[in-house]
Amino acid sequence: MGRRSARESADLTDVLRGGPFVAFLAVLGFTLEIAMVAAYLFWGFGRPSPWNFVAGIGVPAALVVLWGTFMAPASKHRLGENAVLWLSLVAFAGAGAALLAAGATVPGLSMLAATALYVAVSFWVMRSAARAVSGRKTLIARHGRSSANRP
């Protein structure tokens, strides 16, 4: 039981890049995005009139525009991975809190639990990938070329 070698870390990154963790995160992340919009709609339309239309349409619309501009994977203005993850945490947890504030206890707690799972697994994947990249850089520095290019 020792430290993982650079090659083992690289293998882990390859697995995470196209493996079940990435698929799980993609599905969970998209589900949370849809649930977030629905949660803010539910919360907004539960406000007293006339603010129910402003909050019910305005808040989700603003979130969708901001998300599409700064956090969507194909966006030209996408923020860094850490910023996207932290802002996702804020937006998803806010949606869970909005559901709790609107009196939807079970959906609110479910949203918060799914958010915690998503963020925890995302941090683990990012940390594992960073270690693997660091290991590859060390390996390249020691041997002068990538281990992938070796015969």
Image: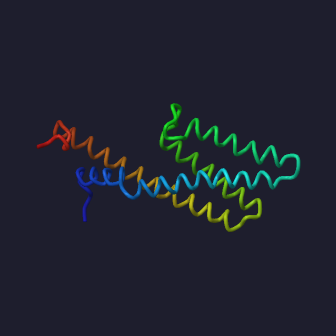
Residue lying at the far top of the rendered structure: 76
**x, y percentage for residue 42?**
74, 55
Quadrant in which the C terminus is drawn: top left
In the image, 136: left or right of 46?
left
Query: Toward which corner of the image does residue 139 lie, by quadrant?
Result: top left
Quadrant in which the N terminus is drawn: bottom left
Q: Taking 24 as reference, is 50 above or below it? A: above
**Which residue is rendered at x = 36% and y = 49% of the image?**
129
**x, y percentage for residue 59?**
73, 44
**x, y percentage for residue 61?**
69, 42
**Which residue is rendered at x = 31% and y = 48% of the image?**
132
**x, y percentage for residue 116?**
55, 60
Query: Toward which corner of the image does residue 66 lie, by quadrant?
Result: top right
- Number of numbered discs present? 0
Residue lying at the far right of the rendered structure: 49
Residue lying at the far bottom of the rendered structure: 106
Q: Taking 81 as reference, is 26 above or below it? A: below
**Which residue is rendered at x = 71% and y = 67% of the image?**
105
Q: Tell me the colour scheme of the image.
A: rainbow
In the image, 9: left or right of 36?
left
**Which residue is rendered at x = 49% and y = 41% of the image?**
73
In the image, 98: left or right of 90?
right
In the image, 59: left or right of 1?
right
